[in-house]
Image: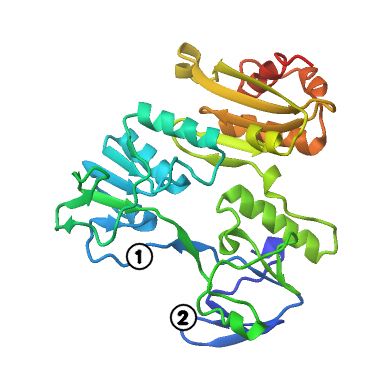
Amino acid sequence: MGELNVDLHVGHGEFIDQQTIQIVDSHGWKKAIAADNIVIATGSRPEFYGSSTPRMVNSEELLRITTLPRILVVIGAGYIGCEFASIYRTLGSEVTLIERKERVLPNWEPEAGGRVEKALSEHGVRIILNHDVSFPLAQTTETQVLIQGPDGTMIEADLVLVATGRKPNTENLRLDLVGIDSDSFLKADAQMRVRDNIYAVGDVNGISMLDSTAFSQANVAIRSILGHKSTYDPRWVPSCIHTEPCLASVGWSENEAAAARMEYLVVSDQISVASDSKQSVIDPERTFIKIIIDAKAHHLLGCLVAGDHAPVIVNIAAIAMKSGLTVENLCEMALVQPSASEALIGTLRKVQL
């Protein structure tokens, strides 16, 4: 990493004091490195680990399995559970998705969860809500797992993915030496600071375990270290779940805007978005777009998109929000047609200001 002027050290890192990290390599050699500021970005791992049966796995273990299960049961309908349910159903497995709460994607806005649930159901995924699976499971063998369903019947599976949460990689960092509690996700403030000169970004702080979040948090931490005014606000960081089709959102949801007593307008549309691929031109994909608009200033407040081009459309909405562009500004722009980005402008042209 010389071109970036970054020194890379491979090994296990642990705190000696608030400005010193000790690195222990694979041979046991130790090296101390002093720093004015330290960023912890050690990530997270699945909470479920160490099952006595190979038929029960977490998401990391599932990725190492090279055979396709005939019947897959996914326990947990967060974004990881929903993505794997979509992937394995597309590959041809029979998939059942079980969630202990009342809706899919319980940590997302209700409309987003409803859209993903509808797409999964139409794709052939069986969804069971309000059902808390008890561990250990009713019966496991070398070839089969049985899970008790909400009505007492048994659900059969060749493989069970347990996607009920993640935990931070904070063990053995010796965070206690610098006064940081490592028993749970690290508590970072709006500058991503955990304590004085120590910062935490990405999964390890548990705020939102998405790539876009980690990038935004890292940018805020770096700017804070360099003395610039910078704060992290998750509302303006785009989120995406890669189901089939995918879903993305940014900004305020309609429910949040209503609860905050904002004056807002809503415009939505179901558009056939054609791309430059042969299949899309012949059979354009249906994409749902919903936009929340400030009724007075005409700025974009939020955007929700369900469709194969959702990340592109939401990224453009996020740029518009950050730049302060109004609906009028956006509608004046000439964009390539057909394209996913033009679908956003086409939806905005329907709003009555």
Q: Which residue is drawn at 46% across and 12% down?
A: 282
In the picture of the structure, the residue carrying the numbered disc 1 is: 49
Q: Real-space Cα distance between discs 2 and 1?
A: 24 Å
Looking at the image, residue 246 sits to the left or right of residue 124; the answer is: right
Vertical placement of residue 265 versus 211, above or below: above
Q: How many residues crowd mark 2 within 10 Å: few (<14), some (14–19), many (20+)?
A: few
Vertical placement of residue 136 versus 82, above or below: below
x, y percentage for residue 51?
28, 65
Q: How many residues crowd mark 1 within 10 Å: few (<14), some (14–19), many (20+)?
A: some
Mark whose residue sits in front, 2 or 1: 1
Element class at badge 2: loop
x, y percentage for residue 29?
52, 87
Looking at the image, residue 27 sits to the left or right of residue 295; the answer is: left
Name the amino acid type tagged 1. Answer: Tyr
* Frontmost residue, 114 versus 193: 114
x, y percentage for residue 21?
64, 81
Element class at badge 1: loop
Q: Which sits earlier in the primary sequence, circle 2 or circle 1? A: 2
In the picture of the structure, the residue carrying the numbered disc 2 is: 26
* Label drawn at residue 269: none
